[in-house]
Amino acid sequence: MKKVIIALLVLTACGSAVFAGEMQKEGSVLLGYAMPGGDVGDTVDGGVAFGFDYDGYKINDMWSIGGTFLYTSGSGDGTVLGVNYDYDVKTWGLTPYAKYSKEVDLGGSKATVFGLAGLGLYGVTAEASVLGTTVEASDSEFGFNLGGGIMFPMGDKMKLGADVRYHMVASDLSYFIPAVKFTYSF
C-alpha cells in the first residue's frame, strides 16, 4: 500500500500547477497489444493493452511531464506431464514520464513525433488453474518504460497516431506494446 501512495503522490506532483510552467491538459486513450517478454514471456501469451495518458505540464515547446495508467492482460493454457493447466496474467501500471516531442513536416502535412521515458509502480496478478484448483499470486514492483510514436492532427483539439512502448516490470517480466493512440486537448 505504501508503494501505491508514493506513486500517486509522484503522479500528482508531475501534473500539478505548483511548477512555474504552462499547463498543457492533453488526455489520451491507448489501445494495443501487449507482447510479454522475459521469463514470463516464454509461457504467457500476448493480450490486450489499454491505457490513459495525461500530459499536464509543459516545460517548453519540446518537453513535457505527464503520466500513464496502463492495464494489460494475457492468458493461455498448456500441458505438463500430461496435466492441463490454464493461466491468466494481469498487469497494471501507474507511470509518470518525461516526454520530448517535435513537430515535423511530412510533405505538406504536419505530424508530431515523440519519445518518452518514465518510472512507475506496476502491479502483477497471476492466476493458474490445475486439476480444478486455482492458485493466485499478486505483487507490486517499481519498473521503467521507454517509448515513442507519431501523432497526426485531426482538427484543432484532436490527434490520432501510433505509440510503441517497452515496459520493464520486473527482472522476469517485460512488455512491448504497440498501440493506437487518440489524444484530445482541453
Image (spheres, helix red, strand yellow):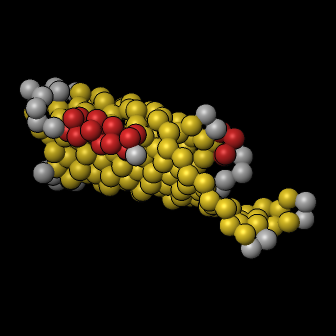
Coordinates of residue 137 in the picture (x, y in percent) = 60, 54
User: Residue at (38%, 53%) from the top-left corner?
Assistant: 51
Total number of numbered discs in the rendering:
0
User: Residue at (37%, 44%) from the top-left corner?
Assistant: 4
Coordinates of residue 19 in the picture (x, y in percent) = 12, 28
Q: Is residue 151 left or right of residue 47?
A: left
Give the answer, above or below, for where 65 lies relative to 180.
above
Give the answer, above or below, for where 29 lies relative to 99.
below
Residue nearest the observer in this picture, 20 or 183: 20
User: Residue at (72%, 69%) from the top-left corner?
Assistant: 133
* Residue 89 in which image quadrant: bottom right
Residue nearest the observer in this picture, 132 or 88: 132
Give the answer, above or below, for where 33 lies relative to 11.
below
Residue nearest the observer in this picture, 72 or 135: 135
User: Residue at (62%, 59%) from the top-left corner?
Assistant: 136
Coordinates of residue 117 in the picture (x, y in percent) = 39, 30
Outermost front residue:
2
Question: Does the rendering let one see residue 160?
Answer: no
Q: Is residue 63 left or right of residue 130?
A: left
Coordinates of residue 163 in the picture (x, y in percent) = 40, 44
* Residue 131 in which image quadrant: bottom right
Q: Is residue 35 left or right of residue 76?
A: left
Residue nearest the observer in this picture, 126 or 182: 126
